[in-house]
């Protein structure tokens, strides 16, 4: 009569092991994706750097030229207001390229209350877009109790104060940091993994197996959500959307396409340079509604 129950327990234990391996695979895949995106960002930044620099230098020249126009008595008050608005627009564009010189222009051109309000909106916007991933903290439950039990068991086995050998004490100090971090994040999977790697395996009751499988399923959902968030809202989401592709040929095409966009902006800036260089062409530019 007990055979089916025992067989079911074995199946559930195998399922638990399979899910633990699945988490390891998902975490390695996500780590690999993050690394690929960082390397891609570094490459694009390296290739784009001289083009961005040329754009910024040209824009700064244009801003200084427009600033001279503001001191020119030939321009009327209304015309100077248009010049100021154009300068603000150009300075924001310079700021978006990460050029610190934009701040001096904006501080000079914009009223303090407007600049402060705009800065507040910007910080709110950045805060809204900033990517933060924090493992959810579980409420008091069987899972939380098991986390405490596992933590105490691992801490008892690996606390460095219990070790006399100096080199082993260092190893246990490093391991204890991982154990503590997993406990603070209420990461049952992390503690299970550490137990599996550093302690002799133990037999789990069927109830424990069910509890672990439930927790592991939640962890797998977290990882899927994390991957989707990384692609849509993460710190490298722009790179992912614009450039990232598993196909190298497509990736190369996307990189060239993005660099081409910056080169086009440089050409537009040079065209603007010709337009703003004297009063006649600048007023004609404003009269056409830009």
Image (cartoon, grey):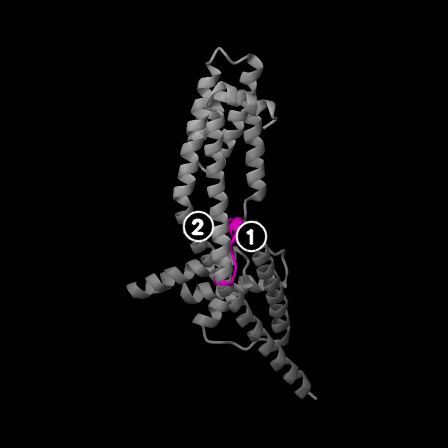
Q: Is residue 34 among what the camera can see?
A: no
Front-most of 138 and 222? Answer: 222
Quadrant where the N terminus sits is bottom right
**Percent position of residue 102, x then y:** 45, 30
Residue at the spot 46% in from the left edge and 76% down from the top edge? 200
Residue at the spot 59% in from the left edge and 63% down from the top edge? 219
Q: Is residue 9 above or below residue 70?
A: below
Q: Please indicate whether residue 155 sits to the left or right of residue 225 in the image.
A: left
Front-most of 210 and 87? Answer: 87
**Percent position of residue 79, x then y:** 56, 17
Asked whether disc 2 touches disc 1, contact meaning CB atoms under 8 Å apart, the reply is no
The label shown at residue 86 is: none
Outermost residue toward the top in this view? 73
Magenta stretch encompasses residue 243: yes
Q: Is residue 193 among what the camera can see?
A: yes
Quadrant where the C terminus sits is top right
Residue at the spot 61% in from the left edge and 65% down from the top edge? 215
Residue topped by disc 1? 241
Front-most of 219 and 79? Answer: 79
Residue at the spot 67% in from the left edge and 83% down from the top edge? 5
**Percent position of residue 161, x then y:** 36, 60
Q: Is residue 53 above or below residue 140?
A: above
Total number of numbered discs in the rendering: 2
Which structural element holds mark 1?
A: helix
Q: Please indicate whether residue 224 sits to the left or right of residue 63 in the image.
A: right
Give the extent of the magenta segment: 234-248
Sequence-earlier tag: 2 or 1: 2
Quarter of the image for residue 166 reads bottom left
Residue topped by disc 2? 44
Q: Residues within 10 Å of mark 1 (few under 14, many from 20)?
A: few
Outermost residue toward the right in this view? 1
Which structural element holds mark 2?
A: helix
């Amino acid at each position: 009569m007990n055979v089916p129950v025992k067989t079911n327990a074995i199946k559930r234990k195998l399922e638990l092991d399979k899910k633990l391996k699945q988490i390891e695979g998902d975490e390695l895949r996500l780590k690999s994706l993050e690394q690929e995106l960082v390397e891609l960002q570094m490459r694009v930044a390296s290739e784009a750097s001289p083009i961005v620099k040329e754009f910024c230098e040209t824009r700064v020249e244009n801003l200084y030229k427009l600033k001279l126009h503001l001191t020119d008595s030939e321009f009327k008050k209304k015309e100077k207001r248009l010049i100021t608005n154009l300068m603000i627009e150009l300075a924001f564009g310079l700021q978006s390229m990460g050029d610190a010189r934009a701040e001096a222009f904006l501080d000079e051109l914009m009223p303090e209350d407007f600049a402060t309000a705009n800065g507040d909106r910007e910080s709110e916007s950045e805060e809204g877009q900033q990517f933060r991933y924090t493992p959810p903290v579980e409420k008091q439950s069987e899972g939380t109790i098991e986390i405490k039990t596992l933590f105490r068991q691992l801490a008892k086995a690996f606390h460095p104060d219990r070790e006399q050998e100096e080199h082993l004490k260092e190893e246990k100090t490093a391991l204890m940091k991982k154990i503590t971090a997993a406990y603070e994040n209420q990461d049952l999977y992390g503690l299970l993994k550490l137990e599996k790697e550093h302690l002799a395996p133990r037999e789990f009751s069927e109830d424990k197996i069910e509890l672990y499988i439930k927790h592991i399923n939640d962890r797998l959902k977290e990882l899927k959500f994390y991957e989707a968030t990384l692609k849509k809202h993460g710190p490298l989401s722009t790179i992912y959307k614009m450039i990232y592709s598993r196909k190298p040929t497509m990736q190369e095409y996307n990189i060239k396409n993005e660099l081409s966009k910056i080169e086009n902006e440089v050409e537009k800036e040079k065209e603007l340079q010709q337009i703003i260089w004297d009063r006649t062409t600048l007023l004609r530019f404003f009269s056409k509604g830009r």
